[in-house]
Amino acid sequence: MTYSIEQLAYIVSAALFVFSLHWMNDPKTARRAVIAGVAAMFAAVLATWIQPQVVHHGWIILAIMLGFVVGVPLSRVPLTAVPQRTALSHAFGGVAAGLVGVAKYFLWLGEGPEHLTPFRMIAIVVEVILGFLTFTGSLMAAGKLQEVRWIPQRPVIYPFQNVINIGLLIIAGALGSLLVAYPNEPWSAVVFLTIIAIALVFGVLFIIPIGGADMPTVISILNSYAGLSAVAMGFVLDNKLLITAGALDGSSGLILSIIMCRAMNRSFTNVLFGAFGNVKAAVASGEQKNYKQETPEGASQVLEQARLVIVIPGYGMAVAQAQHRVRELYDQLTKRGITVKFAVHPVAGRMPGHMNVLLAEADIPYTALVEMDEINSDMPQCDVALVVGANDVVNPAARYDKSTPIYGMPIIDADKARMVFAIKRSKNPGFAGIDNELYFKDNTFMLFGDAKAVIGELVKQLAGGNH
Amino acid sequence: MIHLMLSWRDRRIVRVALAGALCIALCFAATHGLAQASSPEQHQPAAQPPAPIDYWSMLFVFMLATFIGMGVIRRVSRLLHTPLMSLTNAISAIAVVGSIVVTGADYPPTIRLLGGIALFASVTNIVSGFLITDRMLKMFKKQ
């Protein structure tokens, strides 16, 4: 009876999860998605909790309470810290799967080897490898994003790096196969623990060579792994709901990784084994070119005359906390009947869709946020392109200069606008360490200074001229 | 089918992913066969045989759920990819049902402790995942 209730609840939950993701296809229905997800979670948890084999409740209540104590503050982080939080939650997902795998293996080892069927052993080995490598990998990624001092931000490269990484994976795979064939020998537990240790080390080594610019892809890939480790856990526990939810998470991670790779014109292998940062030294050198500067007064006069203004935000805008000033500028311009659009490059933030959230937080309506593919056809009609803290995503060299590491990356065609204003903190090159040709174009004028201060000045000029 | 909906570069990635999955499946099938060959005594009818696991139907569920996931996720608004990721995080923390059984069943304390830590990690993901998703979605306004 309770078994039937459980299975029924699981079916309902699985359906609600699919609905939940379906409702995410439009911001209008998206909040329903959360309600469906929460309902599904409640149903599944309650149906599991009333099962007769659950006899001890103290630890369950304690763990759930602790989960709330840690989870609620984690949901209140500033939106610039969402990528770190996401990476951290992949780590939690990975460690949960890994620990359940360990628990189940030792449980079955103690109860009797007949439980350790080859199928289960395969699932357990996959679960612990994926779970623990996701754990340390995601912790490293979170540390890099949070800019923790003892985790290097720049890619760390050493000789035979890829050989060592792939070698470790092969060793783990070989030990795993050994364990599947002989799950109940005196040395099996040692092999099992060795596999865990290798997975933990591999997670660290796997993330170390990946630079900050590739973080959006890495987060997506780790998302996929966290999902797949949940799938493996479903296989271990014979639980189809877990398999379904894990597969949804895994495919989400895969699709987001594809989108991120496409946005940078890179392949998976290139992101994972390419170490983006090590090409930069060759390119950063070059002859001294001259910028043309413009004052906020002049720029605001030009903006006032425009009909279509396209703002191209980059992560620099978020670093300078300039979103709310950008919103004020948006208000000033729309008040004058000027059309203002925001061109959002898929890798403008530090994770997929990050820039949209940052702009939405500043109360910019989502109808003004336009994807790269749709905005580029508007660019020739654009009177002013305002680049705020974006760099590589507007570098026209990506279209023709084969010697830059960003060659082939799809960009926002800011250079095709009639006039470009670029707000830049200093004259240093950007994240990828590449000179930006846009800044030296005839129709480009630089506004040097902190993005927040410069846009504040523009707003002041526009507001002043209004009286 | 998914194949046809993607551009050539994505198709290549999907193809590599499918090939990888197939390789893993074949490796497992091989080790499975090896394991059966190496321990034939385990497959004699024992005094108390463990309940058979219907792993083929699990693989079936996995395959279908992946296709559904691909189809549904591809239609998700690009505006919402960050909330999507925190939502799927929370959803995959459904692993909590496994942890509840491991923590609450009559198992040795060390095993239950491992389950308890996993339970804590999953609940943290559920709580923070759903709350932050809702917090972000609230910010998306039309005007």
Image (spheres, rainbow, N blue to C red):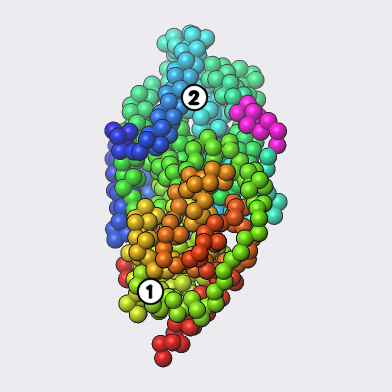
Labels 1 and 2 within one chain: yes
Q: Is residue A425 above or below residue A349?
A: below
In the picture of the structure, the residue carrying the numbered disc 1 is A306
Q: Main secondary structure of the magenta part?
A: helix
Image coordinates of residue A349 in percent, x first then y, are 50, 56
Q: Are marks 1 and 2 in contact (CB under 8 Å)?
A: no
User: Residue placed at 65% from the left, 25% from the top?
Assistant: A190
| Disc 2 element | helix
Q: Is residue A255 above or below residue A86?
A: above
| Disc 1 element | loop
In the picture of the structure, the residue carrying the numbered disc 2 is A122
- Considering the image in quadrants, where does the C terminus of chain A appear? bottom left
Image coordinates of residue A310 in percent, x first then y, are 40, 66
| The stretch drawn in magenta includes residue A343 | no
Residue B43 appears in the figure: yes
Q: Is residue B59 above or below residue A98?
A: above
Q: Which mark is residue A271?
A: none
- Considering the image in quadrants, where does the N terminus of chain A appear? top left
Q: What span is in magenta?
A: A158-167
A283 to the left or right of B27: right
| Mark 1: few/some/many CA within 10 Å (<14, 14-19, 20+) | some
| The stretch drawn in magenta includes residue A163 | yes
Image coordinates of residue A79 in percent, x first then y, are 50, 62
Quadrant of res A289: bottom right
Residue B127 appears in the figure: no
Nearer to us: label 1 or label 2: 1
| Mark 2: few/some/many CA within 10 Å (<14, 14-19, 20+) | many
Residue B70 or residue A374, whichever sits in front: A374
Residue A445 or residue A245, whichever sits in front: A445
